[in-house]
Image (tube, rainbow, N blue to C red):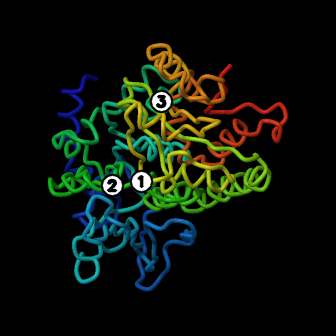
Amino acid sequence: MNALIRSAVALLALPLALAGCGGSDPGASGGRGDAEGCVTDYAEGRDYFPDKSAVTESELWDIDYHGSYKTITLTDTENADGSRLKYVLYQCGTPRPEAVGDLEGALVVQVPVTNVSVTSFNALAMVDRLGKNSTVTGLSGQLLGNAGKDRWYAGVVEAAGNPMSVGEYTDLNKEAVLGLGNQVVLMSGFGRGFDDISNARAAGMPGVSVSNRLERHALASAEWIKMVAAFYNAEAAANAEFDAIKAKYDEVVATASGRVGARNAGYLCIAPERGCEFVHGHGAETLVGRLLTQLGVGNVFAPDNPAPNGRPYDFEKAVGTAADADFFIVYDPMRATRDALAADPRTSRFRPFRDNAFIAGVDENFEECRAKTYLDVDVLIRDFAIGLAPELFPGAKGACFTRAS
């Protein structure tokens, strides 16, 4: 079915989708078929969410349960005025709460959702981990494009039933989103200076901010799977996933923290095709910078670099800043890293590059790892620890980062 026909079918089906499941409010968001577990005998005061999540790590969001609906409140990372985003998730078959008082301005969504679009690769990893790919009717062009070069993405797209393109995360196609009757669009919250989610909401699209990359701590980023799961009533699965990630993460910290030696490392990218002006290095306030601190490693890019996603350096500034570095973690694929080093012989002035004392992203499944490592932070910290101190993990190889040879 081509995109034009699919759009027409989606528009024709919209009134039926908006009807939702039996007994739900007529104004509820659309669904992709009937949701499972819709309430047929609503009673005021009854608890309709036996499985609940508690936020223990995140600094950016929280969740509360109110019998037949739950509220998610999170920091509006795009705006610096201290405002909060609110989502009201009400159980299918129960009354739709009015968005008044404390709920004024909230996005009200019937759950469990059955019809979503995704433009955030981190959110897509969470939807996949929860086993909810069949609910995805739309993806950004970038995510769809990754299906042509990455097996994991291809599998997600196949499980979703060949979803439509809904534009890009910075430029959503309103007609496509509304035509699909999406209940939510899971979008990346990139932080100050961006307005993707604000624009989506202003245009009447149900944008939901997935801002895990702006968390200061790795486990806080992984905990966002609980936020995404709340839209699916999948709290039990999310809690189990997070607990497993935390257990493995803590195991790596116990093994490696303080035992990697007096190392001075840097986390950076250098490949021009990935937008690196020369070196883009992460300081102490980024999620990865805090991982280095947790492992007991010095961060050469920490001074005067408080930005949540690091800062770019010109060549001379980078050389001076990284003069004491004995190890690099490069967040480009290894092949692109090698190409960038070969294209600019000046990079041999950096000791880690000269001595092959670095790790870089795996080539074969780089895009999969890019989507998953801010969820699977246990894998991320283990890869770093293996690279820094392989003797602590005899015979182990990194899953998403590989050593230079």
Q: Is residue 89 above or below residue 307?
A: below
Q: Nearer the viewer, mark 1 or mark 3?
A: 1
For the point 16% across and 41% down, the residue is 175
The N terminus is located in which quarter?
A: top left
Q: Nearer the viewer, mark 1 or mark 2?
A: 1
Amino acid residing under circle 2: Gly
Q: Nearer the viewer, mark 3 or mark 2?
A: 2
Residue placed under numbered mark 2 in the picture: 191
Quadrant position of residue 364: top right
The numbered disc on residue 161 is none
Query: In the image shown, does 351 or 1 lie closer to the viewer?
Result: 351
Percent position of residue 141, x then y: 31, 31
CA–CA distance in space, label 1 to label 2: 9 Å
Amino acid residing under circle 1: Pro
Percent position of residue 304, x then y: 43, 54
CA–CA distance in space, label 1 to label 3: 27 Å
Residue placed under numbered mark 3 in the picture: 153
Is the residue under label 2 in contact with that under label 1 (CB below 8 Å)?
Answer: yes
Percent position of residue 66, x then y: 43, 80
